[in-house]
């Protein structure tokens, strides 16, 4: 395959401006970038990335390259690419990029292969597709891989399943599990960008609507909080009793999906699981119900089943399809059932991706520094790196915070001092 595959290089100047705008809000990554420029930790090292090709991701790729790496990028979702950014990466930053918004599955997997054709030593994933391909179709390259890092919850689920089955043949850093990633990116980023995607796709007023959220993990919490803030009546779907109880204590209504489908106006799934919204559920929904997914893969809504039973289908707005059901009722699906915050909007704001991609940059450096010392399992970045990201973010916001005194440190580390 050629050195790049993007929609149109003429979009590059527009993309460069988007990248520069995002950079202004990514102060932690910029701090790391300055050190990388000086130290060149990745000199002549090949890094293959499979991430959402957005302006924020571009700043991570540029940081890695300035650290001496030979970087190649492909998209981690067929609908998440910002075509102008992909063009800018090729034209202005000389980073081979394989990503076109709306690419079919054949092209998507060709792009994955193109990234691995560079024979990287480190990979970065958002959904674990590169790691999966290395363990299935390209096993001969596993010996060359020092390690990998994973961006999102869904990918970590896949990787832990591989670890549990003793199928994982390389060490992986679960960047998603850093506090400065999931507590902010998943909650605030997914919350805001999902609502943004729903509004851009529908232009609906959320106030007064019944908004059903599938899952009350960090992503679901963020979506629920922002839907509530927009004036929606929020219903939570959960299978975990502790999370269901948390949702109730947070002021939300919790009920089984069989009840919720009769009440909801808007449904958003964010569970990481399959067929959370199935055909039976969609057949029971109200006429005009809107259905969307904010999980990484397009499996949470049974789109194949919907295609089979539909009477008709048409594209009615950008990122929205109208399905006429056998009864004549209409269901509106956003972003083809793919992650709505990137299919219908621009993904997470740069301020929150700053911390996520700071973790990715530090994970790559950690993998390199521990070459040959890590076992084939899923790791979390050390707490001190997590806290350093938080410290740098607070500093960039002009916020100071307290420190423990020597007396307080001694007290917390002792066991013989109590009631006097």
Image (cartoon, helix red, strand yellow):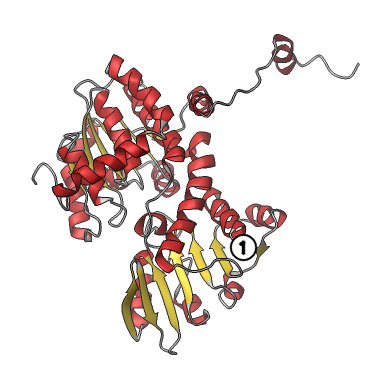
Location of the C terminus (image quadrant): top right
The residue positioned farthest toward the right in the image shown: 420
Q: Nearer the viewer, residue 81 or 121?
A: 81
- Is 90 displayed left or right of 80 in the figure? left
Q: Nearer the viewer, residue 408 or 300?
A: 408
Report the residue at 27% width, 31% height from top.
Answer: 62
Q: Secondary structure at mark 1?
A: loop
On the rendered structure, is 383 left or right of 65?
A: right
Relative height, residue 361 to residue 155 (above, below): above
The answer to whether residue 99 is seen in the rendering is: yes
Q: Residue at x 67, y 64 (%)?
A: 253
Which residue is at 42% across, 74% downward? 332
Quarter-of-image position of residue 264:
bottom right
Task: Please name the residue shown 58% across and 78% down the image.
Answer: 262
Q: Is residue 323 left or right of residue 211?
A: left
Which residue is tagged 1?
Answer: 231
Please rate how many residues cluster around mark 1, counting C-alpha atoms within 10 Å: few if below 14, some from 14 to 19, many from 20. some
Looking at the image, which residue sits at the far top?
Answer: 406
User: Residue placed farthest to the left in the image?
Assistant: 2
Position in image of residue 101 (x %, y %)? 25, 56
Give residue 374's position: percent from left, percent from top: 38, 26
Q: Is residue 30 above or below residue 356?
A: above
Which x, y percent locates residue 73? Answer: 23, 41
Residue 13 in percent (x, y) is at 20, 43
Q: How many marks?
A: 1
Residue 168 appears in view: no
């Amino acid at each position: 395959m050629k050195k790049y595959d993007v929609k149109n290089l003429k979009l590059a100047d527009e993309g460069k401006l988007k990248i520069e705008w995002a950079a202004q809000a990514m102060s932690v990554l910029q701090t790391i970038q300055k050190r990388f420029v000086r130290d060149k930790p990745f000199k002549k090292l090949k890094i293959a990335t499979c991430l959402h090709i957005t302006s924020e991701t571009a700043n991570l790729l540029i940081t890695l390259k300035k650290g001496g790496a030979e970087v190649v990028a492909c998209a981690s979702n067929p609908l998440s690419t910002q075509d102008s950014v992909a063009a800018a990466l090729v034209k202005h930053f000389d980073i081979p990029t394989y990503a076109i918004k709306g690419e079919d599955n054949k092209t998507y997997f060709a792009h994955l292969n193109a990234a691995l054709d560079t024979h990287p030593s480190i990979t970065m994933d958002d959904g674990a597709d590169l790691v999966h391909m290395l363990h299935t179709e390209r096993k001969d390259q596993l010996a060359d891989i020092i390690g990998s890092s994973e961006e999102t919850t869904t990918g970590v689920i896949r990787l832990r399943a591989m670890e549990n089955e003793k199928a994982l043949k390389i060490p992986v850093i679960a960047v998603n599990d850093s506090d400065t990633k999931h507590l902010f990116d998943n909650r605030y980023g997914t919350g805001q960008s999902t609502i943004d995607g729903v509004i851009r796709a529908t232009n609906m007023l959320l106030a007064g609507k019944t908004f059903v959220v599938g899952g009350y993990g960090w992503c679901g919490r963020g979506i629920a909080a922002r839907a509530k803030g927009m004036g929606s009546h929020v219903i939570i779907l959960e299978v975990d009793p502790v999370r269901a109880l948390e949702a109730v204590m947070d002021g939300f209504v919790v009920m089984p999906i069989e009840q919720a489908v009769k009440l909801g106006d808007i449904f958003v799934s964010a569970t990481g699981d399959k067929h959370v919204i199935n055909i039976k559920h969609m057949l029971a929904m109200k006429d005009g119900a809107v259905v969307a997914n904010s999980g990484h893969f397009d499996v949470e809504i049974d789109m194949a089943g919907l295609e089979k039973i539909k009477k008709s289908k048409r594209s009615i707005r950008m990122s929205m399809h109208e399905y006429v059901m056998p009864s004549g009722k209409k269901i509106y699906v956003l972003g083809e059932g793919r992650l709505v915050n990137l299919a219908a909007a621009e993904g997470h704001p740069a301020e929150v991706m700053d911390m996520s991609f700071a973790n990715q940059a530090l994970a790559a450096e950690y993998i390199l520094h521990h070459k040959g010392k890590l076992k084939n399992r899923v790791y979390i970045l050390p707490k001190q790196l997590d806290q350093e990201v938080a410290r740098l973010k607070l500093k960039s916001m002009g916020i100071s915070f307290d420190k423990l005194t020597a007396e307080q440190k001694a007290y917390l580390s002792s066991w013989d001092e109590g009631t006097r």
